[in-house]
Amino acid sequence: MRICRALSVPVLVLAMVVMTMGPGTSAAAAKGVHKPSYIVLDASDGAVLDAYEAGRTWFPASLAKLMTVYVFLNAAAEGVVSLDAPLEISKAAAAQPARKAYLQAGKTIKARKAMLATIIHSSNDAAVVLAEAVSGSEAAFVKRMNEAAKSLGMSATNFTNASGLPDPDARVTARDIALLSLSLIERFPDHLKMFSQRSVRIGKRRLATGNGLLDVVPGATGMKTGFTCWSGYNAVLTTKRKGRSLITVILGAPSRSVRNGRVIKVTNATFKSAVEEEGQPVAEYAAYTPSEKPDRVLPDGKCNRILNASNTGGYVGSGWGVVFGAYAKQGQAWARLAKVVRMLKPSQRRGHRKIVPSVRRPVRLYNALLVGLRRKDVVSICNTLKAKKEYCQGLPPKWLNNPRAVWR
């Protein structure tokens, strides 16, 4: 199946096929338990290469920010806003809950910086700044978001805020997010670099990406992840290998490892599959009506445990990590990271930088790390630094994300 284009706007045409379910699947569905939805597109022409329940509704989480940036870029193209203009930070924007850039009400931020904070760090306050710059208020901007969704053929989507924070009336599907991602690629190719950047500096803060997939999937070129307790773990990943480009969307995963594993599995399988002249068969998935409300992926108890682990510095990142020391001030830790990276070869800089506060020491210190690495990356980095008599400690995943580990 392929994209039908009208007025230069891509519209994904999917046949809604009711899935044939065996007894085990029916029992799971009766309990409201569902495997994550996914869809894989050919980014060059919109061909649907693989899918599973791509029409099922889920809560959007931070994938809503893709539409926020899409609408903002459209407004810039129309001359409504300027990408180089300073944008005012309102009290409403500054009051957004974390994850945020901690923007201060009454000050300004350049439009490009606000977009980078929204995409790279998934900053809720920056997303609202963008919304207010276009429409005057977040509520008015949401109307633009839904109008844009309708124009793109996102028939089962409803946005309720600019950030993707939980709302019972919000919903998206993997199919619709794939449409949006394809539209961003086709309409704004000059701005795609921001979806692959690992960090952005806002004032004195360097905000790191939360998209660990960029460093663990071969050929990854960008896009976004998202998480709330309601949505579970979501992701959009673009990849390019040997001249082929794919868009993979997954929604509703119960854990980060399930999400990442499914993205890697279906992406790899699609790259290995034969390329046909006409549309390839699409995995069947059930049809869902736009009015249906999504199920919450994670029960409150499990979600609270995840959030508590995050708030105490439990989860640091995917893959292997390497720590370069602990420092009394964040600025010192960032300076150490910058110095270390300058010592490394370009091939050794594939991880993304992160500062992690200590949780076990009696005095708060800030650990300087690179995360999202492979084991062989860590070995190479530490060999280089130890030859220069610089400190370097490799951290396997179980140590990297254990708040009781010695390095913490």
Image: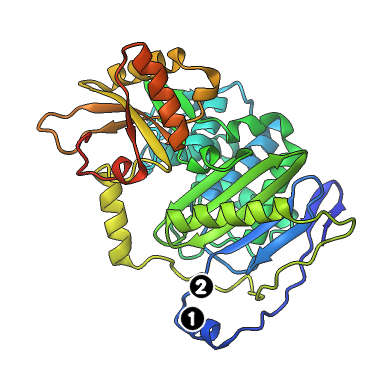
Q: Nearer the viewer, residue 301 or 95?
A: 301
Q: Earlier in the sequence, mark 2 or mark 1?
A: 1
Badge 2: residue crowd in 10 Å (few <14, some 14–19, many ≥20): some
Q: Residue furthest left?
A: 362
Q: Is residue 217 left or right of residue 254?
A: right
- The residue type indicated by label 1 comes to Ala
Per the model, the C-alpha gap separating discs 2 and 1 is 7 Å
Q: Residue furthest right?
A: 277
Badge 1: residue crowd in 10 Å (few <14, some 14–19, many ≥20): few
Q: Quadrant location of the N terminus?
A: bottom right
Q: Residue at 63% x, 30% y: name it.
A: 193
Q: Residue at 41% x, 29% y: name it.
A: 379
Q: Nearer the viewer, residue 68 or 263?
A: 263
In the displayed structure, 60 sits above or below 369; it is below
Q: Position of residue 188 (x, y in %)?
A: 72, 35
Q: Is residue 222 left or right of residue 5?
A: left
Q: Position of residue 100 (x, y in %)?
A: 39, 38
Which residue, given by chain and number where applicable, does mark 1 sit on? 28
Which residue, given by chain and number where applicable, does mark 2 sit on? 34
Q: Nearer the viewer, residue 115 or 45?
A: 45
Q: Residue furthest top?
A: 388
In the displayed structure, 92 sits above or below 341; it is below
- Can residue 43 be seen at all in this image of the molecule? yes
Q: Quadrant location of the C terminus?
A: top left
Q: CB of mark 2 within 8 Å of CB of mark 1?
A: yes
Q: Which mark is residue 307?
A: none
Q: Residue at 46% x, 17% y: name it.
A: 344
**Secondary structure of the residue carrying numbered label 1:** helix
- Can residue 146 be seen at all in this image of the molecule? no
- The residue type indicated by label 2 comes to His
In the displayed structure, 121 sits above or below 204; it is below
